Image (spheres, rainbow, N blue to C red):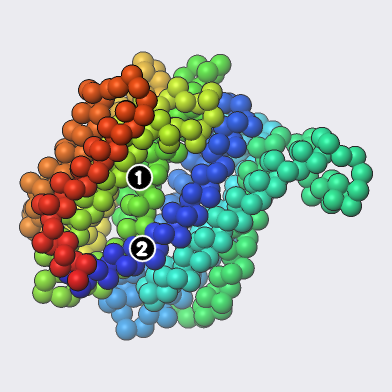
Amino acid sequence: MNQIRKLAGQTAVYGIPSILGRVLNYMLVPIYTRVFEQDEYGIVSLMYSFVAVIFIMLTYGMETAFFRYSELSEKRNKVFNNAMLSLLFTTSLFIFFILFFPAQIAEWIKYPGYGNFVIWIGLIISMDVLTAIPFAKLRADNRAKRFAFIKMLNITANVALNLFFIKLCPAVIKHYDSGIFYDFIKLVFDPDIPLISYVFISNLIASALTLVLMLPVFMRMRLDFDLKLWKQMMAYGLPLLFAGLAAVMNETLGRIMIRYLLPEDIAEAQLGIYAACYKIAILMSLFIQAFRYAAEPFFFSYAKHQDSREVYALIMKYFVIAISIIFLGLMLFIDIVILLIGKDFRSGIEVVPVLLLAYMFLGVYYNLSVWFKLTNRTRYGAYMAVFGAALTIIFNLILIPESGYMGSAWATFICYASMMLLSFILMQKFFTVKYNYFKIAFYMALSFGFYMLSKAISFEISWLGWIWKAALFIGFIAFIYLIERKNLKELSG
């Protein structure tokens, strides 16, 4: 229980600023979906889908390899140097191609004339890659507050710059024609370029700020490259490249395929609607991401303890309780949550419960993934992720032409559910943990059952409906507390 309290505290330290930052970031969704047309927002979503895929390729599992070998090796600084020098070399090659061939890349992704977007996106990715290992070092050194502060500052700067460029600058240009402030706006803002350009420009400036703040960590790097150690790290990390690449493809490939599988006259609009509603489902991923930030170094550092597997089992149970509460809360009050996005984008609300359930399965999979990371069988992680990616491609190809973005949501659901089940099956062979499978399945099913109950019983008077939903939510939490009250008292004590 002491270890679980420690992990919960770390998750809070990582998670609360991250969630607050993401809440700020979510302020952009109402703006984007009210300022941009559906097809314009589709372009933004597609570009960031490419960002996610390329980021995984350029980090090639080195972040997790850093955690693993930091625990195994007494020379943590040498592990840091190896990881940094490796990423610095490969990222430099990437920047070279981006700067010298932007027009050709834009043509290749079927966005001719958008070479400047390619350059901006390439620089954003490069700076994020170069800060990946410094962020990992902060986590490994248990400097969670410093980590959270810089992440929060990055998001805050990005949001503030978006508000400045997308809302303030056009308003000043429209209503004023002189003055010091007007002259400054004219100096930094060009009304003749597409307004969505400033989405990427804002991100670029925020990423540059993060890179500057990470310079003290960079300064610890030395030109001390150990080829033998690097080969060991690559052997461990490369399977995670394929696992990570497949995993991010599972999340982003549906959006990319919507753009290229549907008729051109509706593809980007459909993508925009789907991407906007996807943002609501990503609220579930905020907790999952915060948990992963805290759990990954914890799992590695605690593996040497005799009771480690019992602790992992308890962590899984409490994790499932948390995501079940999040699922039910979002779905009971979806009529309020949906107001985050513009009216023209709300027709895609039907994808939200499907995607939330998919994220629940993904969260369980992340917990289960401890087995192949701790046993150095990372190739199995790659196999499962590639299997998931194959399912994503197959079901998107089948379902998108028939069902549009709803087909992509179901493809995501099938992918994550299958990966979770496959990981569970393989885990029984290599690294048995006695999870309380009954309670895990029960809590997830119960949250879905409470949601279906809210749909089955409705009230014509709106305030009675809200009271009913609030009662269901409180009742669900109270029911869990009654079952877990003994363990929860130990945890809080």
Residue 303 versus residue 103: which sits nearer the camera?
303
Q: How many marks can you see?
A: 2
What residue sits 7% from the left and 46% below the top? 438
Camera-side residue: 85 or 407? 407
Residue at 16% over, 65% down: 489
Compared with 93, 439 (above or below) is above
Give the quadrant of residue 177.
top right
Question: Is 245 situated left or right of 209 in this image?
Answer: left
Residue 179 x %, y %: 91, 48
Which numbered circle lies on residue 422?
A: none
Element carrying mark 2:
helix
Q: Residues within 10 Å of mark 2 (few under 14, many from 20)?
A: some
**Amino acid type assigned to the residue bearing label 2 in the image:** Ala
Q: Label 1 neighbourhood size at 10 Å, few (<14), some (14-19), many (20+)?
A: many
Q: Which residue is mark 2?
A: 12
> Compared to 288, does 274 lie above or below?
above
Viewer can see residue 199: yes
Residue 409: % across, % down: 35, 30
Query: Is residue 241 among what the camera can see?
Result: no
| Residue toward you, 386 or 229 | 386
Q: Is residue 344 left or right of residue 297?
A: right
C-alpha separation, residue under disc 2 versus residue under disc 1? 15 Å
Residue at left offset 42%, top offset 80%: 77
Residue type at tag 1: Met
Q: Residue furthest bottom?
A: 74
Residue 226 sits in quarter: bottom left
Residue linked to disc 1? 284
